[in-house]
Amino acid sequence: MVTAATQATKKSARKSDELLARIIEIVRRTGLAGFSLETLAPELGTSSRMLVYYFGSKDELLGRIVYAVRSATVEAFASQPAATITEAIDHWWNYYRANMADMQFFFHLASRSFEEPDKFEEFSSTAVSVWTSYFHQSLHGVTKSDAEAQAIARLALATVRGLMVDQLITGETARVEEALAEFKSLLGDRLSSPRGRRRTAR
């Protein structure tokens, strides 16, 4: 039997999801500058009090944004697996270059997790593993061991995120992408060298 309380909970969840989708559209357009529940509310036709009801604090809302965006992105990437690590890097880079606000959300939440680690434990526990898994899949059969593939996947993630910070801070797109191209070239050389290839001889 569906109770009135259950129906109210489901209705609230639907409303929360609808608002979140609209909020993501807004903040992707405007970025984090001036971001607050007070500035969002008028665009959504609601009040900051109602946003607190649905999402809690600004940090909690940013967490919801990051999780929602990342889940949708990972799902989209999984449907089109990369054949090589450099192709995986290109997919990741091209997506976030086209959606720079997503990276702003991520780095902002990362900085908040340093200040209040207990509050952002879920974010911290998945921030690396989700994407290293994606890069790792593109290294199947290329490295000598799974441990090496895991290490290279983590290096790839650290490098592209580091270069994305560079891009956000300096805006020097040409230089940043030159560095990215150099990293991909070095990685390609490393994986194609005899030391980097899987040993098949018995």
Image (cartoon, helix red, strand yellow):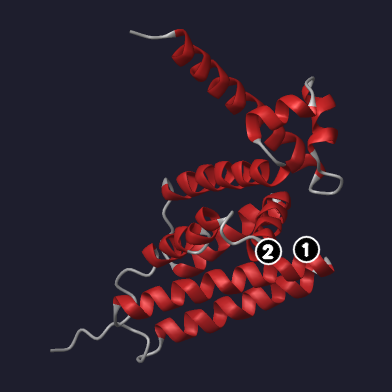
The label shown at residue 115 is 2
Disc 1 secondary structure class: helix
Instruction: State the residue at coordinates (56%, 46%).
Output: 67
Residue at the spot of label 1: 168
In front: 42, or 177? 42
Identify the residue shown where x is 61% and y is 26%.
Answer: 16
Residue drawn at the location 17% of the way across and 88% of the way down: 201
Q: Which quadrant of the rendered structure holds the N terminus?
A: top left
Q: Quadrant of residue 103?
A: bottom right
Task: Kindly identify the amino acid type of the residue bearing the numbered disc 1.
Answer: Leu
> Nearer the N terminus, badge 1 or badge 2?
2
Q: Give the x, y percent position of residue 66.
A: 61, 47
Outermost residue on the left side: it is 202
Q: Relative to 159, is 55 above or below?
A: above
Measuring from the top left, give residue 160's x and y in whole percent: 61, 69
Does residue 109 appear left or right of residue 3 in this picture? right
Crowd band around label 2 with a 10 angstrom C-alpha radius: few (<14), some (14–19), many (20+):
few
At x 68%, y 78%, the residue is 179
Quarter-wise, where is residue 116 in the image?
bottom right
